[in-house]
Image (cartoon, helix red, strand yellow):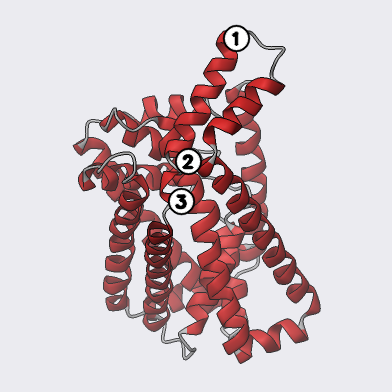
Amino acid sequence: MSAKVKKLIYLSVGIIVSGYLIWKIFGNIDVEKLIETLKTANYFWLIPNILLIAFAMYQRAYRWKFMLLPIKQVRFPNLLAATCVGFMANNVLPARLGEFVRAYSLSSQDKEISKSASLATIFVERMIFDLIALLIIFGSMLIFSENLKMQLESNLEFGSKIIAGSKFAVFVALGGIAVMLTFAHKPDRIGHMLTKYLFFLPDKIKEGVKSIVLKFSDGLKFLTSVKAVFYVGFQTLLLWIMMGVSNYFVFLSFGFDIPIEASFVLLVVVSILIMAPSTPGFLGVYHYGVVISLGIYGITDEEAKACALILHAAQYIVITLMGFYFLKKEHLSLKDLEETAENDL
């Protein structure tokens, strides 16, 4: 199956999912109440929200720096540019190409960092460190949040979905850790095993596969250092705490009288839901996550939907503008990055 066909399938499924959720959320909304809620919001609180969203991009780039240190001390401006361009690409391109775009953006700026090694660090960052941080936050909420406990106990269907999602996340995280540690500690052995089981392929192709494995493992070298792992983990927790707090400022703009824990419950629920196929920018899935999260704390539908619109718009606009700024500043081509990313779908 060609990359273009895969992208078309993902985009089609994403449009269906996003379209359904947008209809489900906004199909029977009281437009007048929604507009009134938006009018009465105090948008001063968007200032700290926007600042934290922007600073989180710097934090991501800073964390990435330590993951790449065993390969090279990459210039921070290059890391920041690649991070912003990659996250912007997720907002404007289909099929979650942003992760690939981010890797290729960095390798195009720094030729000493291979695309495979860059992708390896991003995979570990997203599928292990970010996932574990979210599980820690969610576990803390289950222990300390009485509202969440009551909601899970009173709504068995909702509770079973949350628990099932958490179990799946734990399985993915543990599986990812095992695979990545094996790659990090024994890349030569993995490469040899692959070439052994691909005996039916020409030697040239087998050597190419082995070369890719070795380059990929370069991005995992930091996992061999306990100090580096704990430091990256600490930076990850700081990042997600920052994102959770940023949500709370939007709650303040609408005058919601709810505890700060609600912003972290929302963070976890939205982060899980945006894993589902959707349009670029996570339309529908993001808003649905906000609405069901705020519903736990007794926020009315119109207020929750208004909040979802502002939360999503703030993140979308800030990240997209930052991405396009660095795209132009570093003389990168989004079209070229997209085409390169499509080839690896």
Q: Residues within 10 Å of mark 3 (few under 14, many from 20)?
A: many
Quadrant of residue 237 within the rendered picture? bottom left
Q: Is residue 249 above or below residue 186?
A: below
Q: Residues within 10 Å of mark 1 (few under 14, many from 20)?
A: few
Residue carrying label 1: 203
Amino acid type at image mark 2: Ala
Name the residue furthest right: 156
Residue carrying label 3: 223
Label 2, secondary structure: give it: helix
How far apart, in angstroms, are the residues tagged by discs 2 and 3? 11 Å
Amino acid type at image mark 1: Asp
Label 1, secondary structure: give it: helix
Of tags 2 and 1, which is closer to the observer?
A: 1
Amino acid type at image mark 3: Leu
Q: Position of residue 331 (x, y in %)?
A: 22, 31
* Residue visible at 39% across and 43% down in the picture: 86
* Residue visible at 52% across and 81% down in the picture: 262
Q: Position of residue 77 (x, y in %)?
A: 21, 45
* Residue visible at 54% across and 31% down in the picture: 188
